[in-house]
Image: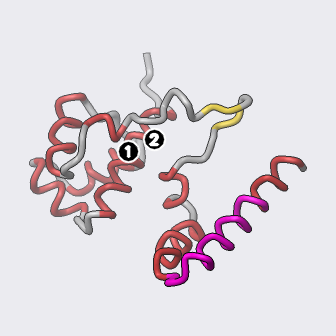
Amino acid sequence: MRKSRSRIDEQVGARVRLRRRALGISQTKLAAALGLSFQMVQRYEYGQCRISVSLLCAVASELDCPIGYFIEGLDDRREGGRVAAGPDDLFNSQYGRSLALFFPRIAQPEGQRVIADLVRAMADDDEAA
């Protein structure tokens, strides 16, 4: 049976990438801590290779988070037959990364609320179309 990349492998890898980036850890540094090459970390992060449970435990330890962080939301990502957007999807898009980077820099809470309302309204319009 041929192994193929699955949505679950992609999500777990994306969550590894999200957490690693949030902590400011390079792929090289994480790889060294795990005894891997940085290319293997890349393959895991992009879901090209499946992460074993034992390796996932080591990754969770290195990234200082519970192992459940990598699989949370797997059961509830489907809404009406469509895959619901999650936090990892934000970092997988060019504009999402910019939004995530600059949004916390908005000092006024009212400004953050207005932008969040605008994004929510635009997303709802896309669903209606």
Q: Amino acid type of disc 1?
A: Gly
Q: Is residue 34 above or below residue 29?
A: above
For mark 2, what is the residue? 10
**Circle 1 sits in a helix, a strand or a loop, which is it?**
helix
Whether residue 110 appears in magenta in the rendering, the answer is yes
Q: Is residue 106 above or below residue 97?
A: below
Residue 20 in the figure: left or right of residue 106: left
Q: Which mark is residue 111?
A: none
Could you say which is closer to the camera, residue 14 or residue 65? 65
Contact (CB < 8 A) between labels 1 and 2? yes
Q: Position of residue 8 (x, y in %)?
A: 46, 33
Q: CA distance from mark 1 to mark 2?
A: 5 Å
Q: Main secondary structure of the magenta part?
A: helix
Residue 67 in the figure: left or right of residue 97: left
- The residue under the point 34% across, 34% down is 50
For disc 2, the neighbor class at 10 Å (few under 14, some 14 to 19, many from 20) is many
Instruction: Give the colouring mode of the picture.
Output: secondary structure
- The residue under the point 62% across, 79% down is 111
Tell me which segment is drawn in magenta: 106-121
Q: Amino acid type of disc 2?
A: Glu
Res. 114 image quadrant: bottom right
Q: Position of residue 119 (x, y in %)?
A: 70, 64
- The residue under the point 48% across, 35% down is 73
Could you say which is closer to the camera, residue 36 or residue 87? 87
Q: Position of residue 78 (x, y in %)?
A: 63, 31
- The residue under the point 15% across, 40% down is 58
For mark 1, what is the residue? 13
Name the residue furthest right: 129
Q: Position of residue 95 (x, y in %)?
A: 60, 70
Q: Is residue 86 above or below residue 76?
A: below
Quarter occupied by the N terminus: top left
Could you say which is closer to the camera, residue 5 or residue 125? 125
